[in-house]
Amino acid sequence: MTDARLEVQEVTKRFGGITAISSASLTVSPGRLHGLIGPNGAGKSTMIGVISGFIKDFSGRIRFDGRDLRMWDPATIARAGISRTFQQATPIAGLTSLENVMAGMHVHHRAHLGSVLFRTPFMRREARAMRASAERMLAEFGLAEDAEADAIDLPFGKLRFLELARAIVMRPRVLLLDEPAAGLNPHETERLAAIIRAQVQAGVGVLLVDHDVPFVFGLSDQVTVMNFGSVIASGPPDRVYRDPAVREAYLGAPEQEAA
Amino acid sequence: MALILAIGLATGCVYAVVALGYSLEYRTTGVVNFSEGNYVMIGGFSTWWFLRHTPLPYPLAILAGVLLTTLTGIVLWTFVVLPLWRRRSPPYVVLLGTIVFGAILSILALLLLGPMPQTLPPWVPSFSIALGESRIDGQYLVVVVLTFALMALVGLTLQFTSLGREMRACAASRETSELLGISPERMGLISFAATAGLGGLAGAMITPAQFTSSDVGLTYGVFGFVAAVLGGFGTMRGALVGGIFLGLVNALVGRYISSNYQTVIAFAMLLVLLAVRPQGITGKHWEEAEA
Amino acid sequence: MKAALLRPAEAAALVLIAAICVAAPFYGSRLVTYNLTVIALYATVVISLNLLLGFAGQASFAQTTFMAIGGYGVAILTTRYGANPWLAIAIALVVSVLLALAIGRPLLRLRGHYLSMGTVALALGTWSFANASTITNGGWGITGIPSLTVGGFSFRNPTAFYILAWSVCAVSLLSWRLLGNSHIGRAWRALSTRQDISASLGIDVNRYKLVALLIAAVMASVAGSLYVCFAHFVGPDLYDISVVINLMFMLFVGGLRSTVGPIVGAAFVVLVPQMMAGFERYQNIFFFLLLLLVILIWPAGLFGRVRR
């Protein structure tokens, strides 16, 4: 495995007159979780959009695998090993939960059109293996009983887990999580944390963006705090937590932390 | 040559009105109404019928035609578009609905009014203009002048009246306008009724210079759409520029190649434009974000 | 797309259709065989729509264009250049594919309305061209297309053509299902839902849209060619706006994304007019009103499923 470290270097993104991100840098290392917090409008989601290739026309560099991803389109970035979730969990309509997760395995399929049409042994083997993987994944996420249900019928919490499963099944080297805990109850949040921890232990580099500060701090090896597009602090959780600039800008009264 | 220019300008003005209709309806409701061209047909054809079969004097016959066309627009909105709109049907379903509605109108016109093309008397009797060596039917001038007047009127209404402001606000989004206390459904009704009326008037205007029949609706609908995209979909200026441009091109094609090739060439232009400069000639582009 | 297994209603319908198809040559009249042949060919085009629109969500109204290339291609190449009909079908197919490749990229980049309107304009442009051009013999159409032969065996025999037509239909349907249940089908469903999410899953959205269009073009072109070989005639009215609307009708009445829907829808449109003998003038309006009703009141059609 080559350099699977994701380095965001001096990225600045302006939307018209508004500076969403100003000269921000951060690094996501394999097997480490990097938390990204900040008030609304701080530029956190923009950061994910920039890294995953959905937001273009920015200055700065995104280095991964020894290459600069700045000009790459989202599909290519995904295939390179960077997966993401979206703030709004959107299942693919018309597919079951199992099929949704299998859709995440798209990057692993090698069979092409001809193989599918002629049902070659290769294609059938591959399909069986993918299906088995997807079923295992669903079980791990506690969604086994919903495998054959239409994904859009799932309740909110399960949709979040489905979204996460779909991203993880891509077996990424870097995982970008955009507010995965939003709207989850404490029990679900704990399960989420366990899943994320397992990914980190497996060597995936994770960038976790969320409003739930204890949640983020509990998982992070390193935390970056943004405000008005700029990085105001970055470092190990304890140090950041005590940083006066951070307290002033964001943490303020502890009651304000809930999502 | 002068005649070709006159025809081109006049038909171009009709395309512009149709294009304006597309833009207006699209911006207030997000719906592309492919039955747009039928308003032109109904306006002209029904005016002929009123003139022929009722004792109404010519101006009132035109009014009756326009009112009937407006009614058609209201029917389309209320019974076809609104139910689908409320259900948030995918765009192509609504489009299909308007296409089918238009086809039904066309067939009804055929059944009720007959297969023969008809024409109308000129608005200003014996009005013709001398251009160089040729004498040109003055109706063409009537069309052009009235179209510009109508578009100016629409523009002023949109810009300076509260109704216009509300319609422009709807262009942002359904949800936003609801928050502002505007009823998007009422706006939709008004825009559909208004564009129908305008289309009907355009039909009554152009028929004396050409003719009308039950199947011209589709053609005007297609050309109006191409004109809208050519000029820049969603803008008034674009509608006018695109309409006149296409009108002139069509007139030239009709004269020097064959009128049968007009759709083909229009489509080819459309395709090239969409590939190269989707925002149209005037450079403004109304793009709808992917759902 | 509760994929692999058919719902009971659909499975039953499929069995019934298969039974009818097998029995028809033995017990049915020539009219029955004729109708079923036409149904098979139209169903094939509707299946292509069921793929392009049903799976990939691309609302293209221009399948008639590929049908026209298939139909006129065969007619022109056989009558004017003496080509073997099979070769003509193949060449027309290649032309269809080339056209799909040429216009596919710019066309499929269009969103929602623009794609639909662009393809409506394409369909109308095709009809217009067929009416206008000397190559297509304008409104007169082309007659005298020879029969398909294999070795010494001629498909002039209605039963033989019947089998050929249904074979093509069956292959199309099978392909549709195989693709639908594969990762390709899932990729299509993904891009039909949200293009950005699909991209985040590593799906090359543009390529997959184009593949859907290509497959649909192939099906429509072959069906178009075969129809012309069957009818020994081609004319512009085979591809006018009514046909465009009727194709959508067949798809919707049968049920979007259903397996038997295309066949059932095609059967409806082919058979009902024959029961309305004496009312030809009102046929079109009847169908269009019905389609409007289906869209407004019954969007799922006979075998489709509608969410919410």
Image (spheres, coloured by chain):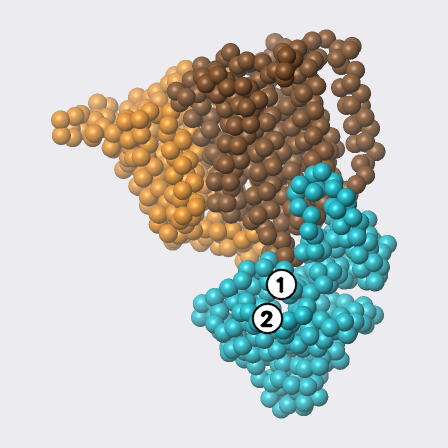
Chain colours: A cyan, B orange, C brown
Mark 2: few/some/many CA within 10 Å (<14, 14-19, 20+): many
Amino acid type, residue under disc 1 in the picture: Ala
The reply to whether discs 1 and 2 touch (Cβ–Cβ < 8 Å) is yes
User: Label 1 is found on which chain of the structure?
Assistant: A
User: Label 2 is found on which chain of the structure?
Assistant: A
Q: Which mark is residue C303?
A: none
> Please, is residue B132 above or below residue C202 in the view?
above
Query: Is residue A156 or residue B57 the one in the foreground?
Result: A156
> Please, is residue C70 above or below residue A238 in the view?
above
Query: Which residue sits at x=16%, y=25%?
Result: B134
Residue B20 visible: no
> Please, is residue A169 above or below residue B144 in the view?
below
Left-right relation of A236 to A59:
right
State which tag comes first along the sequence, 1 or 2: 2
Q: Where is residue B65 drawn, in percent x and y?
A: 42, 27
Q: Disc 1 designates what residue?
A: A80
Query: Which residue sits at x=50%, y=13%?
Result: C143
Q: CA distance from mark 1 to mark 2?
A: 9 Å
Residue C45 image-quadrant placement:
top right
If the image is split into quadrants, where does the N terminus of chain C sit? top right
Query: Which residue sits at x=55%, y=71%?
Result: A62
Left-right relation of C243 to A107:
left
Q: Disc 2 designates what residue?
A: A64
Q: Residue furthest left?
A: B133
Query: Which residue sits at x=74%, y=46%?
Result: A123
If the image is split into quadrants, where does the C terminus of chain C sit? top right
Query: Is residue A252 or residue B90 the one in the foreground?
Result: B90
Name the element at disc 2.
strand
Residue B134 visible: yes
Q: Where is residue C194 drawn, in percent x and y?
A: 62, 52
Amino acid type, residue under disc 2 in the picture: Phe
Name the element at disc 1.
loop
